[in-house]
Image (spheres, helix red, strand yellow):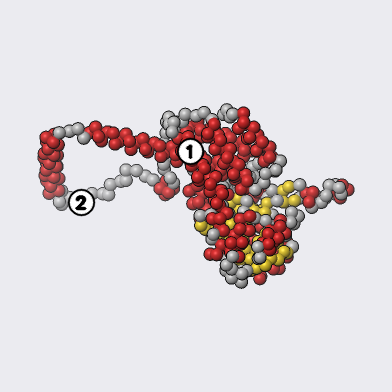
């Protein structure tokens, strides 16, 4: 894979910021990944989709390896790969239609006399076949009923449900008109969609937030903030925010909600279970949504979701479709990311640090059984339907880059 000097410098800068966690958050990571991949499609030299797909996959592995916890990188790479394959299929189908139309026009050169002769020949063949079938039926009237013929092909239920478009597609076919189409699709389906994702989720707020309810949330999430702000335009409700120690993102969230006139109360993380009995609904954000319907969210989300399940309180997760990941959480501990413990115990207290093992988790894994509904930018779905959303957005061949 050969990238231009300017593009290679952009990629290295992005990788460096990912490793140092100077760029954090699914939205910023996804947007910059989409811009880089668009530049790759535009500036690299390729004559067929096979070369382009390999270039995108190689770059996707580099970006994902820089920060494996930022699953949005791999999600955008898979989305671009699906767009490339869809464009290739459309191009090949268009070529097939044009070729078939040309062949039909060439076949229309027969004269009327030839068509009449062909019709007479086909009538004679049909009558002879019909007479032979009648005689065969008369001879075998008293015979036993023949056994049911076997199916010519066998197919499992999985093959019936899986999209079969990619089986017979030749991605190595030369096509020089795909580049502008792919760039246009990336702009419209990914980059433009990222710009409107918050509005798409917030517009559904009135369907889920009702008057005089008590809503609990944790941490700071722009998606949840816009969701609650939109509901507050026509509904009066109260919000309880867990402070999310030691980052204190909950205090920032409470200040933002109070600024738009929402009655907001900040509580300590240890008081979540005690207050949950008064809560009507829990609304949280997500860093990533995994294939089984579980999610990676800010630390403390697992505690809030578990308390909500104990009190039979519904849990709503506001998330965008670009956060859906086809990865399955075989090892849950991989998603419980820990960062520097300086916010918990300062390095200046050296004598105490030597005697204590301090962990500062940044993300929590929330199991799917703790979630009632995902609210995304195109609608809503339960955790059991996440697999279908993933199948619609990604190609099954690109699950592992």
Q: Quadrant of residue 268?
A: bottom right
List the residue tagged with mark 2: 144
Residue at 53% over, 34% down: 42
Tag 1 and tag 2, C-beta contact below 8 Å = no
Residue 160 percent location from the top left of the image: 40, 48
Classify residue 11 as left or right of residue 385: right
Q: Quadrant of residue 253?
A: bottom right
Closer to the camera in the image, 191 or 95: 191
Q: Nearer the viewer, mark 1 or mark 2?
A: 1
Position of the N terminus by quadrant: top right
Q: Is label 1 in a helix, a strand or a loop? A: helix
Q: Is label 2 in a helix, a strand or a loop? A: loop
Classify residue 146 as left or right of residue 77: left
Q: Is residue 137 above or below residue 242?
A: above
Closer to the camera in the image, 238 or 49: 238
Decide which of tag 1 and tag 2 comes sooner along the chain: 2
Q: Which mark is residue 284?
A: none
Residue at 55% over, 45% down: 191
Q: Which mark is residue 182?
A: 1
Residue 127 percent location from the top left of the image: 11, 43
Residue at 50% over, 45% down: 188
Q: Is residue 375 above or below residue 61?
A: below
Closer to the camera in the image, 205 or 270: 205
Say if residue 371 shows up in the picture.
no
Say if residue 92 shows up in the picture.
yes
Residue 381 percent location from the top left of the image: 52, 58
Q: Residues within 10 Å of mark 1 (few under 14, many from 20)?
A: many
């Amino acid at each position: 894979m050969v990238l231009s000097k300017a593009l290679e410098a952009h990629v290295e800068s992005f990788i460096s910021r990912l490793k140092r966690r100077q760029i954090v958050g699914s939205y910023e990571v996804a947007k910059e990944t989409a811009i880089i991949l668009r530049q790759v499609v535009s500036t690299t030299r390729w004559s067929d989709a096979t070369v382009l797909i390999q270039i995108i996959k190689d770059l996707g592995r580099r970006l994902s390896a820089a920060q494996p916890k930022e699953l949005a990188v791999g999600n955008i790479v898979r989305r671009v790969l699906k767009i490339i394959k869809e464009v290739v299929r459309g191009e090949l189908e268009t070529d097939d239609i044009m070729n078939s139309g040309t062949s039909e026009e060439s076949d229309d050169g027969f004269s009327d006399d030839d068509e009449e002769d062909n019709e007479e020949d086909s009538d004679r063949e049909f009558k002879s076949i019909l007479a032979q079938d009648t005689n065969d039926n008369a001879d075998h009237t008293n015979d036993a009923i023949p056994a049911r013929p076997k199916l010519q092909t066998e197919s499992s239920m999985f093959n019936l449900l899986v999209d079969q478009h990619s089986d017979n597609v030749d991605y190595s076919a030369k096509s020089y008109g795909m580049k502008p189409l792919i760039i246009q699709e990336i702009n419209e389906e990914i980059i433009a969609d990222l710009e409107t994702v918050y509005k798409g989720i917030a517009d559904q707020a009135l369907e889920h937030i009702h008057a005089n309810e008590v809503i609990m949330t944790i941490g700071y999430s722009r998606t949840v903030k816009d969701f609650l702000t939109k509901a507050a335009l026509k509904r009066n409700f109260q919000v309880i925010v867990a402070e999310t120690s030691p980052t204190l993102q909950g205090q920032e969230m409470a200040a933002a909600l109070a600024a738009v006139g929402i009655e907001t109360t900040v509580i300590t993380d240890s008081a979540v279970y005690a207050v949950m009995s008064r809560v009507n609904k829990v609304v949280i954000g997500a860093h990533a949504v995994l294939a089984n319907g579980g999610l990676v969210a800010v630390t403390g989300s697992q505690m809030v979701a578990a308390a909500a399940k104990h009190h039979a309180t519904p849990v709503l997760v506001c998330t965008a479709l670009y956060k859906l990941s086809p990865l399955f959480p075989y090892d849950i501990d991989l998603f419980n990311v820990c960062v520097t413990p300086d916010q918990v115990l300062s390095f200046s207290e050296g004598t105490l640090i030597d005697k204590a093992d301090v962990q500062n988790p940044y993300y929590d894994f929330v199991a799917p059984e703790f979630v009632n509904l995902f609210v995304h930018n195109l609608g809503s779905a339960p955790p059991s339907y996440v697999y279908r959303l993933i199948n619609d957005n990604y190609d099954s061949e690109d699950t592992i880059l």
